[in-house]
């Protein structure tokens, strides 16, 4: 008890002068050295010696106002994390800091020190960091000449609203001629810079379904011409640490406006900190379109697909005959709608175009719908052959 009281007193004194210090840049709290591990990692693999830690906020003095800048919030959490970890005698290396959707960090820790933290009442969660590795695209026939899904959901008109779409993925082709990308507002959490270009292709494909420009070539998106902001959390292999994905959600929560739409065509096994970050971000009035997943499984077994909330929509996939895709996850809740996800033609890296299948392709249809309808999607019938016996409504503008 005395130790906790002393720690709080130290933090209170420390926070009294944080506001007088020069703000550190966002780059100062982000570091990665996972390249060798990533090349051999499988989806859900534990990253040795690395942990995601979420504070029990009632146990610490977080005093930076909600209206403060994102960097001020990150720096406060970083300062508190440093004081706290040193006070309990733990050796560590901070890798990520979270200050918007949750208060916490990712750090290199010994297993013994991680166990020590797990017994501290000031810690809400401490979980091994894990890898997310994107599944290979589902095999499909040759690309179609037009994106049938855009027509099926009633999209294709040029977007005239003021909101933007945030793509949390592998980045986006920043100079694709069929995309309207605002690179200056994005961030690359893989290389720690603002140049969130796509060296995989998945993120660019999702972006095109959301908002490809209605022009004389290529394809057209649901909310044609809407501004795309890339947040790169996955590398060229489609891999990324869960801790980095959380950082991407935290960044979006700090920078997006209510009414903006976020596409998350990624996910893995149950991981509470990701769920918490997505839920808390959505409570700011930011719309989230989440892929249900491609495991032919109950979506309740996957994060962030299983998250429910007023501004969150989890999307299953169907084919052009309105039949439930064989690979799609299911379950009501959390699945809210079904959308086109088989043989979807869209933009790709390097200024190209390609066809892909997956719930990763279904979610962007909903992301575009959310922009067009300001978060009030409609339905157009129900998907056929839904394996849970409760047919998902088909999303429509």
Image (tube, rainbow, N blue to C red):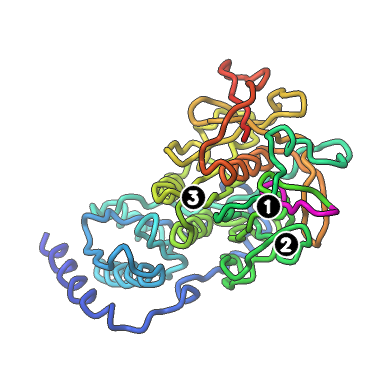
Q: Residue at x 80, y 37 (%)?
A: 139
**Residue 207 horizontal/vertical position (percent):** 68, 52
The image shows residue 233 at horizontal and vertical percentages of 59, 59
Place of residue 251 in the rendered image (x, y in percent of width and height, measured from the top left)? 48, 61
Q: Where is residue 327 in the image (x, y as percent from the top left)?
A: 69, 31
Q: Earlier in the sequence, mark 1 or mark 2?
A: 2
Q: Is residue 168 visible?
A: no
Residue 258 appears in the picture as rendered: yes
Q: Would you say 192 lies left or right of 104 here?
A: right
Q: Which residue is drawn at 72% across and 51% down?
A: 208
Q: Dot 2: what SS?
A: loop
Question: Residue pushed farthest top?
Answer: 389
Q: Quadrant of the N terminus?
A: bottom left
Q: How crowded is mark 3: few (under 14 residues within 10 Å), some or many (20 or more)?
A: many
Per the image, the residue denoted by label 2 is 173
Q: Is 380 one of the magenta-colored residues? A: no
Residue shown at 82% from the left, 36% from the top: 140
User: Which secondary structure, mark 1?
Assistant: helix
Disc 2/disc 3 C-alpha distance (Å):
24 Å
Would residue 68 be found to the left or right of residue 396 on screen?
A: left
Number of numbered markers: 3
Mark 2 or mark 3: which is in front? 3
Pick whichever, 95 or 247, lies toward us: 247
Mark 1 vs mark 3: in front? 3
Query: Could you tell me how far apart the alpha carbons at marks 1 and 2 are, in whole angstroms?
Result: 9 Å
Q: Read off the magenta span.
A: 207-217
**321 or 159: nearer the viewer:** 159
The residue pinned by badge 3 equals: 259
Contact check, label 1 and label 2, Cβ < 8 Å:
yes
- Label 2 vs 3, first from the N-terminus: 2
| Residue hosting label 1 | 207
């Amino acid at each position: 008890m005395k130790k906790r009281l002393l720690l709080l007193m130290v933090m209170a004194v420390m926070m009294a002068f944080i506001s007088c210090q020069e703000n550190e840049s966002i780059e100062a709290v982000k570091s990665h050295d996972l390249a060798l591990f990533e090349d051999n990692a499988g989806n859900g693999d534990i990253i040795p010696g690395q942990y995601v830690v979420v504070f029990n906020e009632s146990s610490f003095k977080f005093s930076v106002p909600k209206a403060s800048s994102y960097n001020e919030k990150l720096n406060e959490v970083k300062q508190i994390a440093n004081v706290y970890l040193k006070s309990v005698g733990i050796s560590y290396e901070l890798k990520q800091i979270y200050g918007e959707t949750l208060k916490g960090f990712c750090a290199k820790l010994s297993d013994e020190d991680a166990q020590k933290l797990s017994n501290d009442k000031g810690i809400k969660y401490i979980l091994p960091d894990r890898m997310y590795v994107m599944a290979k695209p589902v095999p499909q026939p040759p690309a179609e000449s037009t994106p049938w899904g855009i027509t099926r959901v009633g999209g294709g008109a040029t977007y005239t609203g003021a909101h933007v779409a945030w793509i949390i993925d592998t980045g986006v082709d920043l100079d694709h001629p069929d995309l309207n990308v605002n690179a200056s507002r994005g961030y690359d959490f893989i290389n720690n810079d603002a140049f969130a270009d796509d060296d995989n292709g998945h993120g660019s494909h999702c972006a095109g379904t959301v908002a490809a420009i209605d022009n004389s070539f290529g394809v057209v998106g649901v909310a044609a011409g809407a501004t795309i902001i890339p947040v790169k959390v996955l590398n060229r292999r489609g891999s990324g640490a869960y801790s980095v994905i959380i950082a991407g959600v935290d960044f979006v929560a700090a920078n997006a406006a209510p009414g903006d739409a976020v596409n998350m065509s990624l996910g893995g096994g149950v991981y509470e900190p990701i769920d918490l970050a997505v839920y808390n971000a959505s409570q700011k009035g930011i719309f989230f379109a989440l892929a249900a997943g491609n495991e032919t499984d109950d979506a309740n077994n996957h994060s962030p697909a299983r998250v429910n909330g007023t501004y969150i929509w989890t999307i299953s996939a169907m084919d052009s005959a309105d039949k439930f895709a064989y690979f799609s996850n299911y379950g009501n809740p959390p699945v809210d709608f079904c959308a086109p996800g088989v043989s979807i033609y869209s933009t790709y890296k390097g200024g190209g175009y390609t066809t892909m299948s997956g719930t990763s392709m279904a979610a962007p249809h909903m992301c575009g719908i959310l922009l067009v309808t300001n978060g009030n999607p409609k339905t157009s019938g129900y998907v056929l052959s839904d394996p849970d016996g409760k047919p998902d409504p088909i999303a429509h503008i």
